[in-house]
Image (spheres, rainbow, N blue to C red):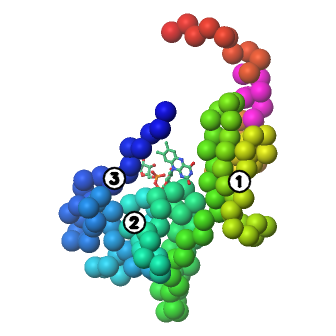
Amino acid sequence: MVWAAGIKAPDFLKDFGGLETNRINQLVVKPTLQTTNDEDIFVIGDCASCVQEDGSFVPPRAQSAHQMASRCFSNIVAKITEREMKPYIYKDHGSLVSLSRFSTVGSLMGNLTRGSMMVEGRIARIVYISLYRLHQIALHGYLKTGLIMLVGRINRVLRPNLKLH
Ligand SMILES: Cc1cc2nc3c(=O)[nH]c(=O)nc-3n(C[C@H](O)[C@H](O)[C@H](O)COP(=O)(O)OP(=O)(O)OC[C@H]3O[C@@H](n4cnc5c(N)ncnc54)[C@H](O)[C@@H]3O)c2cc1C
């Protein structure tokens, strides 16, 4: 099954304090992530429409939202301390698609590989699970992530095969 629902920001952003929006209600930002109409407002993630030097738009992905957060933080600090702000440049580290226990495929791009490297099967699955755990650690910390993993293991043994309700 191929799902191609696309993305659209909520309608209330259309008339949000006179800020510039595009046809899918994203707020248009400069490379510094400041809105075009108000330099005191920074926008990051899916609701930001940010154009890159080559004319392409930053894709609405978790890794871009994460990278934008870091650039936004350093730019706000630069603005407060009256230093020069830097443009946000999207770095694609690759993509992974998990099809549960059936398969995992993806491409990795990073410091270790020139261009992209296709991965699939067990290696792709290990990379996917490691990334997932790293995200959990970032959100919940080591202790809680360890407990979540332990409960998951116990549940695998205890969970009934039949769903009652
Ligand atoms: C099914 C699916 C799979 C995806 N898989 C991937 C993937 O494999 N890799 C990848 O890189 N990206 C993936 N993405 C995209 C990724 O999830 C988004 O790009 C990323 O989460 C954007 O981060 P964000 O912080 O901008 O928005 P979000 O993570 O969507 O956070 C927005 C937050 O704002 C809250 N919110 C919304 N409206 C209001 C309101 N009115 N008031 C207060 N709070 C509000 C929401 O509850 C939410 O918590 C996927 C997206 C979907 C839907």
Residue at coordinates 72% horizontally, 58% vertically from top-left? 117
The response on whether ligand 1 sits within 8 Å of label 2 is yes
Q: Earlier in the sequence, mark 3 or mark 2?
A: 3
User: What whole-number distance in Å separates the C-alpha atoms at marks 1 and 2?
Assistant: 29 Å
Which segment did they paint magenta? 149-155
Residue 33 found in image quarter: bottom left
Residue at coordinates 21% horizontally, 71% vertically from top-left? 18
Q: Is residue 27 above or below residue 7?
A: below
SS class, disc 3: loop
Name the side, left or right, on which 85 lies relative to 11.
right
Q: Earlier in the sequence, mark 1 or mark 2?
A: 2
SS class, disc 2: strand
The response on whether ligand 1 sits within 8 Å of label 1 is no
Residue 74 found in image quarter: bottom right
Name the side, left or right, on which 58 lies relative to 155.
left
Residue carrying label 3:
8
Q: Residues within 10 Å of mark 2 (few under 14, many from 20)?
A: many
Residue at coordinates 46% horizontally, 58% vertically from top-left? 60
Residue carrying label 2:
48
User: In front of the other: label 3 or label 1?
Assistant: 1
User: What whole-number distance in Å separates the C-alpha atoms at marks 3 and 2?
Assistant: 11 Å
Rendered image: mark on residue 88: none
Q: Earlier in the sequence, mark 3 or mark 1?
A: 3
Amino acid marked by disc 1: Met
Query: Does the CB distance between marks 1 and 2 fall below 8 Å?
Result: no
Q: Is residue 115 visible?
A: yes
Residue carrying label 1:
118
Amino acid marked by disc 2: Ala
Q: Is residue 7 above or below residue 109?
A: above
Q: Is residue 36 above or below residue 16?
A: below
Residue 81 image offset from top left, x and y in percent: 52, 89
Residue 153 image offset from top left, x and y in percent: 77, 27
